[in-house]
Amino acid sequence: MRTRAPAVASLLVIASLGLSSCADLGGLDLESVGDEGKTTYIKLALNQAETHPSYIALENLSSRFEEATDGRWKIEVFPNEQLGSQQEVLQFVKSGAIEMAIVSGTQLENMNKDFQVLNMPTTFSSIDHQMTVIRDQDLMEPLFQSLAESDNISVIGGFTQGTRNLYTTDGAVVTPADLSGKKVRVQESAMHIRMIELMGGSATPLSYGEVYTAMQSGVLDGAENNEVSYVTQNHHEVAPFHSNTEHLVGLDYMVMRHDLLEAMEATDRELFLEEWDAAMIEHTGLWNTQTEAAFERAEAAGVEFVQVDEQAFAEALAPLRDEFLTSDFQRDLFEAVRAADTGEETP
Ligand code: GCU
C-alpha cells in the first residue's frame, strides 16, 4: 500500500527528466519562457495520490492555463512523492531543478520560523477563515515574499489541509494521559514535535510516505492528519482508532521559483495567478465533499470514532502559543489573522 517512491528513486526520476538536482536551472531558459511557437514545461511536485483534491485541482489548473496560453505553458503534476518527499522537493525548487511544489507549512517553518504563525493550533478556527486569510495578498505578502531573495522561493498561496485529528493503532485515546508512551508521527517541525508532547505523546518526525509502513510494522503507535489523508493513504487500515482532537486546521503552500515568476510576461503571470486563485477555490469545494466521503469510507471500514475530552486537550496545548510566538512580527501577524475571522464555520 506504499505510495511513495523512495528518495533514491526520486533522484532517478530527476535524472531521467534530464536534470541535475543542484545548481542547474532545470533546463529552463528563463529568457524564452512562454515564448510563441514552443511549450514551456513546468514541473510541479505533489506528495498526494491522484484521487486527492490537491491533485485534481492542480490538474484542472494545468489544463486551464495550457488552454488559455494556446499551449505555450504546460504544468506537469507529479503525484505520490515521485519527485521526492516534501523536504527534498523544496530544495529542488530552491535550486531550480524543478519549478513548483505543494509543501506543508511545516516545511517552510524550517526556512523561516514566521511560518509557524499559520501552522499553530488556534490560529484558524475554520477552513473558511483560513482561505480568506490566505487569499488576502496584502496581509500575506510579507510572509509569502520572505524567501524570495534568500532562497529564490515565492509562495503564491495555499490549499487547506482541513482539520487534523489523532489516530492510533491500538486502543482509543480520550485524554492526553491515554497518549502516554505512544509514539506518534509528526511532520518535520520543532513546533509540531512540541505539540504532540504537550498532547501527551512521544513525537516521531517522519516524511508522509513512510507513515503507513511505520504504523503497520509497529514502529509507530499513531499519527495525526485530516480524514482525506487518513483514507487516501490507507492509514485507517492500520490505525483504526480515530480521536477527534481537531487540534489544527493545517495548511499547504504552493511554492514556486521566484526567478521564474519574475521571468514570465506580465500578462501570462496575471493569467497564471488568476487561474491559481480559481484553483484554491475549487480545491476548497472538493475538500469539503471529499472529507465527508472519507468519513463514510472510514466508518464502513470499521474505524472506531472516539469522542475526546476537548477541554483537556485545549488546556494541554495552551502553552504552545507563547513558546513559539516569540517576535513582534509573529505576534502581530497572529493577531491580524485572528481578527480576520468572521466566525463563519465551514458546513
Ligand atoms: C497533509 C498535507 C500534506 C502533508 C501531510 C503530512 O496530507 O496536505 O502536505 O505532507 O499532511 O502529514 O505530512
Image: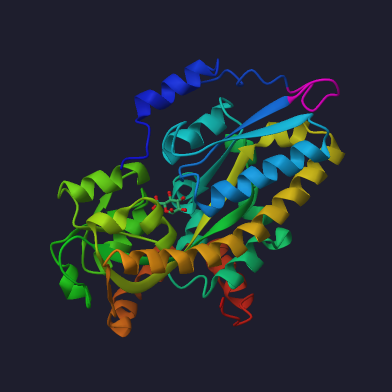
Looking at the figure, which quarter contains the C terminus? bottom right
From the top left corner, tell me how far across and down residue 127 is, in percent. Answer: 55, 69
From the top left corner, tell me how far across and down residue 287 is, in percent. Answer: 54, 62
Question: In the figure, 129 relative to 93: above or below?
Answer: below
Determine the main secondary structure of the stretch shown in magenta. Answer: loop
Question: In the figure, 309 relative to 66: above or below?
Answer: below
Task: Decide whether residue 82 is among the magenta residues.
Answer: no
Q: How many numbered marks appear?
A: 0
Left/right of residue 59 with respect to residue 21 in the rendered view: right
From the top left corner, tell me how far across and down residue 294 is, in percent. Answer: 42, 63
Q: Nearer the viewer, residue 144 or 232?
A: 232
Q: Which residues are magenta?
A: 30-39
Q: How is the image coloured?
A: rainbow
User: Is residue 147 among the parts visible in the rendering?
Assistant: no
Looking at the figure, which quarter contains the N terminus? top left
Q: Nearer the viewer, residue 36 or 264?
A: 36
Left/right of residue 28 with respect to residue 297 in the rendered view: right
Left/right of residue 298 with respect to residue 129 in the rendered view: left
From the top left corner, tell me how far across and down residue 299 is, in percent. Answer: 33, 69
Q: Residue at x 66, y 58 (%)?
A: 282
Q: Nearer the viewer, residue 200 or 146?
A: 200
